Amino acid sequence: MSEYDITIVGGGVVGTTFACALKDSGFRVALIEAEVTSQAVSRAQAYSISLLSSRIFEGLGVWQQICPQVETYKKVRLADSNYPATVQFAPHDIGTETLGYVAEHRVLITALQALLHTCSNVDLFCPAKVVKTEYHSDDAVLEVMLNGEVQQIRSRLVVAADGSRSPLRQQAGIKTFGWQYWQACVVATLKLEAPHDNTAYEWFWHTGPSGILPLPDNRCRIVWTASRSQAEKLLAMNDREFIEAFKQRYGAHFGTPEIEGDRYLFPIQLMHSREYVRSQLALIGDAAHSCHPLGGQGINMGIRDAAALAQVLQTAKKRGEDIASLKVLKRYERWRQWENLIILSITDLLNRTFSNQIFPIVQLRRFSLWFLRNIHPIRSLVFRIMSGLTGRAPQLAQR
């Protein structure tokens, strides 16, 4: 039986970030990932990366590899459907040189996996699947299917980074609250005819908010929110029909773009775990929370979870404490649970406020946009909250 201090289940961006954050910790770490590396690298996803997340990657030592392959956005425009008065955020609003970045999944996971291979204290089990987990008074035993055979791993602490349907969370009986939205998102990559001008857009329509994120080579990533039936119709369109629908909604600003790759659809939910920890177990990333993609918050909350938990565990080790005890793990929960709940609440409120045509609410939200446009301290505070710059920053982001 292999023995580890920490076993991470889930080797996506969040799980691998957590493993890399433990590089010089003195812990012996196992990382279990079900998807083969080539599939993970080829996944067609892109994320809005906040300034705080970029600082965490810089603290890990991978940002120099990531940065040349991402797109920087220096303007963010908020618009309420076709209402002419928009809100524009700029770097001077928060005293930085830029507002954020857009990174494709392959760029992030490739850089993180390269760093992972230099971590002599981390063993990667891939492709492998956890088939059974038993928790005892001072450790956990995991049965792992690897190369057609079941291996046993004994670990002081198990960290679930296994997604919003986390089997580890469900097996532990940790309750969640939340709901499925009436909406779904259609995601596509477009090659633009007109320059994107390093601008990220958030358009609020009565069917739901839609984001357009700039990518390298004058491409963009569109996340188009609509009712589930409308989203299915958008997905079923051929490329020409989809581009015409895009131009009809967003006008001629982007010219006539071309679709790159496949479009795909995903449902939207809000989910928050009532507990982030149990003895011998901690949840990070989508295993602990998921939200509307508005503002690209999900991946950034998960990256902050990973950095925060790594810091809590390393501090406990220096103090000679049991890293798997509730006393230690509750420090992580107190740190991240409320910060994440605030972001979840803001995204839900914005989605509900803007996804309707009730006249008093329409007037209220347009007054709110006027407020953001004309009152600089409020505009600055809102963007700092959504960028993760108002909460407690992990030490990794301060290096």
Image (spheres, grey):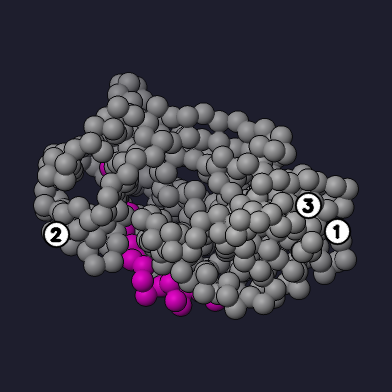
What crowding class fits label 1: few (fewer than 14 Cα within 10 Å), some (14-19), or many (20 or more)?
some
Query: Is there a contact, CB below 8 Å, between mark 2 and mark 1?
Result: no
Q: Is residue 279 above or below residue 352?
A: below
Q: Could you tell whether 106 is left or right of 201 in the image? A: right
> Closer to the observer: label 2 or label 3?
3
Residue 135 in the image, given as x and y percentages of width and height: 80, 46
Callout 2 amino acid = Ala
Magenta span of residues: 61-81
The label on residue 209 is none
Tell which circle, 1 or 3, labels the residue nearer the N-terminal end: 3
User: Disc 2 designates what residue?
Assistant: 194
The label on residue 322 is 1
Q: Is residue 391 above or below residue 289?
A: below
Residue 68 in the image, given as x and y percentages of width and height: 37, 75
* Residue at 62% in and 66% down: 124
Give yes or no for residue 97 being in the magenta stretch.
Answer: no
Callout 3: SS: strand
The label on residue 141 is 3
Give yes or no for residue 63 being in the magenta stretch.
Answer: yes
